[in-house]
Every structure is written in structure tokens, then in C-alpha cells.
Amino acid sequence: MQEKPGEDMNQGVDASAVLLSDEIVSFIESGTSIVLGVVGAGGRAQTGRALAARVIAPSTIRVIYAAEGNAAVTATARSEGPIAVTFSAPLSHRTLQMKGYACRFEVVDADDLDCTARQTLAFAGVLAAIGLPPGFVQAFHEYRESEPLVLSFLVQAAFEQTPGPGAGRSI
């Protein structure tokens, strides 16, 4: 991985990092809809749906996603380029976006699996609450059982993306 000036993912905090408040961490880990985008060496972005996310330091996020259906994301992420992850709560439309200069693959651990089970169950409950058919909700919840992969990144920019006058402002 190429480190950017001031970046040290092992320490989790540096001068260029965004410190995530307890409230933002709770939101990220609550069972939101998560979309990740990674940019490859050629500048082309690939996007996919993540299953869960875990904040492991004040500025470091682990994003857990299924290998199945995300081959392009995985291939692109191997370049360890920029990453953007959007967290959205469908019932309120609250949306936050986190960006980092570089992402890297990590080994999936037991805490990743636990948070994936908890967050996919919570999100499946949201899907049911908005009226999606039970078969779809069950299929979504069971999707967490495919092979999980983890990307981590240091948050170096964060934005409010909830529709309305505050959309796009830094947080």
C-alpha cells in the first residue's frame, strides 16, 4: 500500500484523519444500507453492496462484504486505491459518506462475523418494515452466509449526504 502524507493505518489516528464521534459510530454499526466504491489503478470505480461495517479505531473502518456478486470490487480493491463508503438508513433517509485515500484487504475475524450477523439482521428488519416481501427479506439475511471479505481504510473525509440543504457538508 502506498501511504499518503500523514497516514498510518496501524495507529488509526493521524493529522489527516477524521475522528468519528460515538454517535456516528453507532449509526455506521446500526444496520444501515452500505454501498462501497473503490477506484482502481486506471481511475475506474467499481461499486458494490456491503453487509456490515465496524469502526475499530477513532478513524478506521472495516467494511465487510460478500465475495459473491462483488468480483469487480474485489479485483479493483487489490490496487489499494481510494475508497468511498455510503451508509444510509432507509426509514429516515439519513446518509453519511466516508472516504479514504487507500483501502487494504484484512483477514476476516470473529468480530467481523458477529457484527455482520447483527447488522444484516437489523437491516433485514428495516426491509420488512418498509414492506418488502418476506422472501426478499429472508434472502437478504441469508446472503451474509456467502464468503465474507474485509476492506479497511482510514477515514480522511466524511460528508453528510442526507437529502436536503445540508447534503454535501463535511462532518
Image (spheres, rainbow, N blue to C red):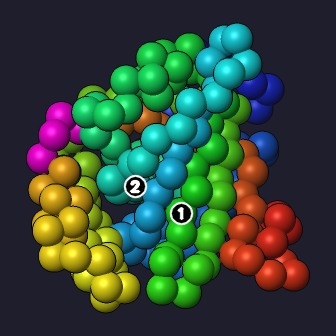
34 up-or-down from 161: above or below: above
Horizontal placement of 66 versus 22: left or right? left
Please state the horizontal and vertical placement of residue 73, each as a whole percent of the image. 46, 28
Dot 1 alpha-carbon crowd within 10 angstroms: few under 14, some 14 to 19, many 20 or more = many
Which secondary structure lies at badge 1?
strand
Q: The N terminus appears in which quarter of the rendering? A: top right
Label annotation for residue 41:
none
Label annotation for residue 53:
2
Q: Amino acid at mark 1?
A: Phe
Horizontal placement of 151 versus 9: left or right? left
Q: Amino acid at mark 2?
A: Ala
Circles 2, 1 touching at the beta carbon (< 8 Å): yes
Determine which residue is flagged by label 1: 87
Q: Quadrant of residue 146?
A: top left
Q: Residue at x 23, y 38 (%)?
A: 148
Please state the horizontal and vertical placement of residue 150, each as a whole percent of the image. 35, 36
4 up-or-down from 18: above or below: above
Q: Residue at x 62, y 71 (%)?
A: 95
Horizontal placement of 145 versus 90: left or right? left
Report, in whole angstroms, how far the alpha carbon at label 2 lies from the one at label 1. 9 Å
In this orientation, which residue lies closer to the viewer: 118 or 90? 90
Which contiguous range is marked in magenta?
A: 145-149
